[in-house]
Image (cartoon, grey):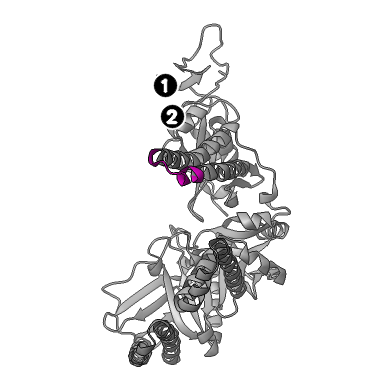
């Protein structure tokens, strides 16, 4: 890698001025010309499905209009298909790419010509994907990404489509040149790490998306066949109607969720390839191949949604630089190294990925103080209490009974449920330093356990709200260049947070400590001070026996070097990291 190049750097700036937008015929390659019929087929299928749905919906409500609507739909469909084919042909004629010894270049555009150039040393991912239509033509989409978190479209060069064998050749070529530009030398492949067990497919329905799928399917069905199905529902008693609707949502959601999970993860394989590269391959209709260099890996994350956790399963995601972040489907698919599988297997896979004999996520974690539980119980009361009071007041003011009954039902059902979720959330809190890793766990409806390499921590953030200050709690965040950028331990005792940060990164935190020790009572923060030293004129502000006092260098009847026992730390802030040079680097 060139001096000064950052592993998290994004796409190199587009060259201007000296870059000729008219490609030199030598060295440039065009996209596969079969992109034209592919565009025609995709557009035809799309407009056929949408047009047929529109015609059926109109015919069900106004049968006499079905004929004219069908003719207009056909005319619009032919026009759209023609436009798609013409656009694809023009795009194919104007698109060229080439791979040199140090750059990947792509030139596109029909009306507005565009030239983009990416340094190979900044390439982070080389992914191959193919939908059913592309697979039928023997084509794939090759995506070369830098992992830039902002401007996602600018951080990816997409070659669509290219022939499958050509995509494999380009992928191998790019990975080899990435290693020669700054990666480790190629070594022997470790082979298969994990592959799909058909029994894992049952976990696909244990997600929050299952009822949403069911509601969507039921809404579409009711819109298309409203007359017969709506008449049947209106003919039955209300209680039976509710039961039928709920059963329909559950059944439809289960079927759709199972099919989506099966299509996404069937054929899953996780391999370690030469050069310490992890490769994930999966998919039935749309196949995907995602590569991740292990030198970009900073840790792993075990994800356990509530339903999956109750079934004893978990998913393994990568915490690495150069990957998309966010809550979108594309981001999740790039991070996932192992789909939902039995938790013991997930921990074994995580251990193999990290090169450990035992996964750090399986270690026992330190619990958080009881004040954290009380905060979550108060939050649950604030969620349930106001609606109950509002309904009761509305019922009393209007003299109607149903608001009062609804308030009682909400209190009887919502109270215990809210308390159970609050207690489960508290039990999910935990943190520890396990060998080379900082482990943090949090969440109830979506519990996550992160094992972050300690060398990957580049800073700490300490946040304390007014309510946290009253309970002596803080939220400690470990800042990193990988994943979401920071991982937090919520509602930790203030002294325990300082001890945790000091144990995880002693060389990073020690220069900022003024007095005391990492394991005990540290107060105040002065840039550049050394542990145990007292800065002239600086008197740490602490709380002794519940009262805030200025702590002088010596108290009456006590030697100046003795440690003062503090029951509550009022405030602790880390100074700007610019005053300290961190010499630790992730290997």
Q: Is residue 101 magenta?
A: no
Q: Residue at x 42, y 74 (%)?
A: 157
> Which residue, given by chain and number where applicable, does mark 2 sit on?
526
- Vertical side of 476 occupied by 20: above or below: below
For the point 45% across and 87% down, the residue is 45
- Residue 385 visible (yes or no): yes
In this view, 69 is above or below 205: below
Q: Quadrant of residue 34?
A: bottom left
| Marker disc for residue 311 | none
Q: Position of residue 33 (x, y in %)?
A: 43, 92
Q: Which corner quadrant of the image does residue 98 belong to?
A: bottom left
3D distance between C-alphas at marks 2 and 1: 9 Å
Q: Main secondary structure of the magenta part?
A: helix
Horizontal side of 72 relative to 123 (left or right) equals left
Disc 1 crowd rating (10 Å Cα; few below 14, some 14-19, many 20+) is some
Which residue is identified by label 1?
A: 538
Residue 223 or 354: which is nearer the viewer?
Answer: 223
Secondary structure under the numbered disc 1 in the rendered image: loop
Q: Are marks 2 and 1 in contact (CB under 8 Å)?
A: yes
Range shown magenta: 397-406
Residue 85's spot in the image, x, y percent? 37, 91
- Are there few (<14), some (14-19), or many (20+) residues within 10 Å of tag 2? some
Residue 461: x and y in percent read 47, 41
Q: 238 or 179: nearer the eye?
A: 238
Residue 177 in view here? no
Residue depicted at 66% across the width and 42% down the height: 365
Determine the secondary structure under disc 2.
Answer: loop
């Amino acid at each position: 890698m060139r001096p000064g190049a950052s592993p998290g750097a994004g796409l190199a700036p587009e060259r201007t001025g000296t870059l000729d937008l008219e490609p030199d015929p030598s060295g440039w390659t065009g996209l596969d010309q079969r992109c034209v019929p592919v565009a025609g087929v995709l557009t035809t299928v799309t407009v056929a499905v949408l047009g047929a749905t529109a015609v059926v919906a109109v015919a069900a409500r106004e049968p006499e209009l079905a004929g004219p609507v069908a003719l207009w739909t056909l005319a619009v469909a032919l026009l759209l298909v023609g436009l798609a084919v013409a656009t694809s042909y023009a795009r194919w004629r104007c698109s060229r790419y080439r791979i040199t010894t140090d750059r990947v270049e792509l030139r596109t555009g029909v009306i507005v010509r565009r030239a983009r150039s990416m340094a190979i040393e900044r390439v982070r991912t080389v992914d191959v994907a193919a939908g059913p239509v592309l697979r039928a033509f023997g084509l794939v989409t090759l995506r070369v990404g830098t992992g830039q978190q902002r401007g996602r479209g600018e951080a990816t060069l997409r070659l669509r489509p290219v022939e499958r064998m050509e995509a494999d050749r380009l992928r191998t070529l790019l990975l080899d040149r990435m290693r020669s530009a700054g990666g480790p030398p190629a070594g022997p492949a470790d082979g298969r790490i994990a592959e799909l067990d058909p029994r894992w497919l049952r976990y696909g329905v244990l997600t929050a998306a299952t009822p949403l799928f069911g509601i969507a399917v039921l809404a579409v069905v009711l819109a298309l066949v409203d007359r017969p199905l709506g008449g049947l529902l209106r003919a039955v008693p209300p209680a039976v109607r509710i039961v039928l609707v709920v059963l329909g949502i559950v059944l439809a959601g289960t079927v759709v969720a199972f099919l989506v999970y099966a299509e996404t993860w069937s054929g899953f394989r996780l391999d370690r390839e030469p050069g310490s590269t992890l490769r994930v391959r999966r998919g039935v209709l749309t196949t995907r191949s995602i590569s991740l260099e292990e030198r970009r890996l900073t840790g792993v994350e075990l994800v356990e949604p509530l339903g999956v956790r109750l079934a004893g399963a978990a998913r393994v995601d990568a915490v690495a630089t150069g990957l998309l972040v966010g809550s979108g489907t594309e981001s999740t698919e790039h991070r996932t190294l192992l789909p939902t599988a039995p938790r013991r297997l997930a921990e074994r896979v995580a251990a193999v990925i990290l090169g450990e004999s035992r996964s750090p996520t399986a270690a026992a974690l330190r619990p958080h103080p009881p004040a954290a539980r009380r905060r979550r119980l108060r939050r649950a009361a604030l969620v349930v209490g106001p609606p109950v009071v509002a309904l009761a007041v509305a019922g009393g003011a209007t003299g109607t009974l149903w608001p009062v009954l609804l308030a009682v039902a909400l209190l009887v059902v919502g109270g215990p449920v809210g308390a159970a979720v609050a207690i489960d959330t508290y039990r999910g809190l935990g943190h520890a330093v396990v060998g080379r890793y900082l482990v943090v766990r949090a969440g109830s409806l979506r519990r996550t356990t992160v094992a972050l390499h300690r060398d990957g921590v580049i800073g700490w953030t300490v946040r304390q709200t007014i309510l946290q200050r009253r309970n002596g709690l803080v939220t400690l965040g470990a800042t990193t260049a990988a994943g979401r950028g920071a991982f937090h331990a919520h509602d930790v005792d203030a002294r325990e947070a300082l001890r945790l940060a000091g144990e995880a990164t002693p060389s990073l935190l020690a220069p900022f400590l003024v007095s005391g020790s990492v394991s005990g009572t540290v107060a105040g923060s002065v840039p550049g001070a050394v542990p145990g030293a007292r800065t002239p004129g600086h008197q740490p502000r602490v709380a002794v026996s519940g009262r805030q006092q200025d702590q002088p260098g010596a108290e009456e009847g006590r030697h100046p070097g003795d440690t003062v026992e503090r029951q509550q730390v009022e405030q602790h802030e880390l100074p700007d990291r610019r005053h300290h040079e961190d010499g630790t680097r992730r290997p």
